[in-house]
Amino acid sequence: LVYPRLQPGADATNILLTGTAFPYTRDWFRYVVYNDPNWDPATLTVKDMAYSSDLNPFDIATWKGDLSGVKDRGTKILHYHGLQDPIISSDNSARYYNHVSRTMGLTSAQLDEFYRYFRISGMNHCSGGPGATFIGNKPAAVAGYEAEGNVLSAIVHWVEDGIAPESILGTAYVNGTKDAGVAFTRKHCKYPTRNVYSGSGDPNIPESWNCV
């Protein structure tokens, strides 16, 4: 799998775009794919990518599009990705979601039964960032415990009560510090819809935004 480009602005943290090979990628090819500590990442071509994909060491590939087994046993998937992720392109999550949709022949409405994907604007890699990124995905990012704004509570509510999340309410704090008070809140939309400002109203409250 060759990943798509980062979202505009995600390169601001300067993690990948440094002029040097990303160490995880370099060491993966050196010590897993080729077992050659002298392999030079500057020689990387599409042939190396194809070889690595075909080799699939330890069955590590995560590109299975048929989730029938997941669906049939009643499992629920709540998938989120920060749009400002500077390490793993958030475009790949949409790419995977659409891959599942095509492979299983299911529309988004049909996928909703067991698989929902939410794009979190302004979130870095898994958490943090200037957006409304407090969504309960880790102890340091909890704004509350209600299912509306806490992904852990939301998946429990979905599995145990049969009520699936339509959006995830995120909270941003001034300077990222809860003690400094709330800067703004935003409802993160269920893919394929996205947040669009209504054109009027306070942009710091979710009611001024629509999922379209």
Image (cartoon, helix red, strand yellow):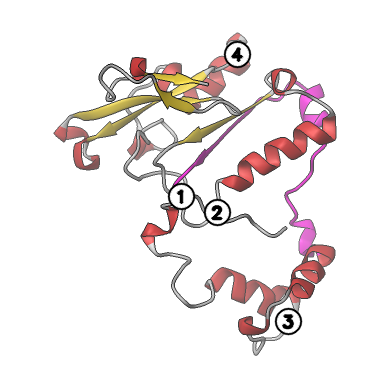
- Labels 2 and 4: the sequence-earlier one: 2
Dot 1, crowdedness within 10 Å: few (<14), some or many (≥20)?
some
Are circles 2 and 1 on residues that touch, CB within 8 Å? yes
Q: Residue at x 52, y 54 (%)?
A: 6
In the picture provided, is 113 more to the left or to the right than 69?
left
The secondary element bearing badge 2 is classed as loop
Magenta stretch: residue 79 in it? Answer: yes
- Name the amino acid type tagged 2: Ile
- Name the amino acid type tagged 1: His
Query: Looking at the rendering, in which quadrant would you find the N terminus?
Result: bottom right
In the picture provided, is 102 more to the left or to the right than 143?
right
Q: Residue at x 27, y 16 (%)?
A: 201
Return the residue at label 2. 88
In the picture provided, is 189 more to the left or to the right than 124?
right
Q: Is residue 150 visible?
A: no
Return the residue at label 1. 125
Between marks 2 and 1, how big is the CA–CA gap? 7 Å
Does 38 sit above or below residue 127? below
Between marks 2 and 3, how big is the CA–CA gap? 25 Å
- Name the amino acid type tagged 4: Glu
Report how many numbered discs are placed on residues in the image: 4
Residue 160: mark: 4
In the picture provided, is 48 more to the left or to the right than 124?
right
Are circles 3 and 4 on residues that touch, CB within 8 Å? no
Return the residue at label 3. 35
Magenta stretch bounds: 56-85
Dot 4, crowdedness within 10 Å: few (<14), some or many (≥20)?
few
Between marks 3 and 4, how big is the CA–CA gap? 47 Å
- Which marked residue is nearer to the observer: mark 4 or mark 1? 1
